[in-house]
Amino acid sequence: MIRSAPRVRRRYPPIERREAIDRETLERDYLSKNRPVVFTAGGEGFCDRWSPAALADRYGRCPVEAEETREVYVGERAHVTRPLADLVTAALEGDPTLRWKGLEFLKRVPGMQGDLDARPPPHRAHLPASAGALRDTLWIAPRATTSSLHHDGDYDNLNLQIAGRKLFLLLPPPLHEDLDSYGSAESPINPFVPDLERFPRFEGLPAVEATLAPGEVLLLPKYWWHCVYTVDPAVNLSTHFRWGGELSPWSVLAGAPIVHRSLTAIAAGMKRRGLHGIADATRRAWCAAYARVVPRTTPQERCELVDA
C-alpha cells in the first residue's frame, strides 16, 4: 500500500545490456562470473498469450492466493484468496493493495503449468544445457508496488518481463552488514529513496539498475540483493534454476559475516543432496530463534516514485 507522497527516486548506473545473447555466452561471461545482464529474448507471441487480459480470459475464475503489499518483510504479509480475474482488474485499475505471485502454479491454477510447458517462454532457450531444479514464478502486480530489498538464495534466476515495466535495482552479495540486513535475506532499506540518516552505510554501495520492458530478460545471479518497483501494471515470469558449473555459495558469499556464510553454505549443501526437509526445518528453527533474539528493524515506508 502506498502510504506517503510520491518522491523523486535516486538513480544508479545501468546494468549491462546485450541486444542478443546465446546460452554459451550467457553461461561463460555472466553466470560463471556471477554477473547480471539484461538482454532481449523476443517472444511477442508468448507475451501476448500471457498478458493480463489473456490470463483473465483463460483462468479468470480460478481462485489464487495473493499477498497484501502494505508490509515490507515477506513473513509479515497477509494472504487472501481471490479469483484471478479480480486481481487482474485491480492491478489494471491501479489498486496497490494486492499482488499475486504464483509459486508452483501448476498446483494453484489447473492447466497453467501445462500451458507454459506446451509453449515454453523464450528465456528458457538461454538456460544452460545442464540447468535443472527449475522453479517458475508468475507475478501480477499493480503500478507502484515495491518489494523488499532481498536476495533469493542459492538459485540463479532469469526474469522475463511479459507486460508493463518493472524497475530492478541490484547489489552484489557480500553486503549484509552494510544493508542492515534483518534475518538472512531482507533489508529494511528502500534503496530508491534511502534514508541515509538511519542507514548511512548504504551511501556509496555499488548498486545498479535496469527498467525491463516486455520481451526483455534480466539474469539475476544467486545471492544478489534486489528491490523491484512496478512502473506500470505488470506481468513477469521468473525461472530459478541450478546448473552444472555454478559457483558455490561459499565462494559467492566471500566477505559476508562468517556465521551467515557458513550456515548458508551448509543449508545449500543439504538441499543439493536432496535433504530439503532437513534444510527447511533448520531454516525455520533458525528464523524463529532469530526473531526472538534480534529486535525487529523497522523498514522504510514504500511510496510512489517519480523521476527528477
Image (cartoon, helix red, strand yellow):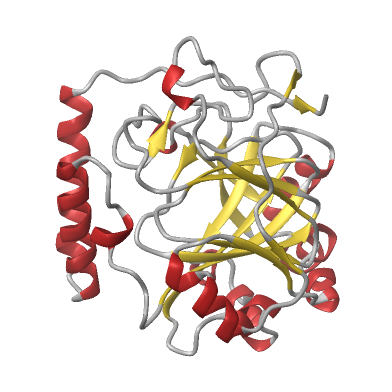
Which residue is located at x 75 percent, y 33 percent? Answer: 95
Which residue is located at x 51 percent, y 64 percent? Answer: 157
Q: Which quadrant is home to the N terminus?
A: top right
User: In the displayed image of the protein, which residue is found farthest to the top?
Assistant: 197
Which residue is located at x 47 percent, y 26 percent? Answer: 202
Q: Which quadrant is home to the C terminus?
A: top right
In the drawing, does residue 107 fall left or right of residue 91?
A: left
Q: Relative to 286, is 302 above or below?
A: above
Judging depth in this view, the residue of 126 and 47 nearest the camera is 126
In the drawing, does residue 277 fall left or right of residue 305?
A: left
Q: Relative to 307, is 25 above or below?
A: below
Picture coordinates of residue 229 (x, y %)? 67, 39
Instruction: Kindly indicate the quadrant of the structure image that contains residue 60.
Output: bottom right
Total count of labels: 0
Which residue is located at x 52 percent, y 40 percent? Answer: 206
Picture coordinates of residue 214 (x, y %)? 80, 62
Picture coordinates of residue 256 (x, y %)? 27, 43
Instruction: Kindly indicate the quadrant of the structure image that contains residue 195.
Output: top right
Q: Relative to 243, is 179 above or below?
A: above
In the drawing, does residue 278 fall left or right of residue 146?
A: left
In the drawing, does residue 70 fall left or right of residue 33?
A: right
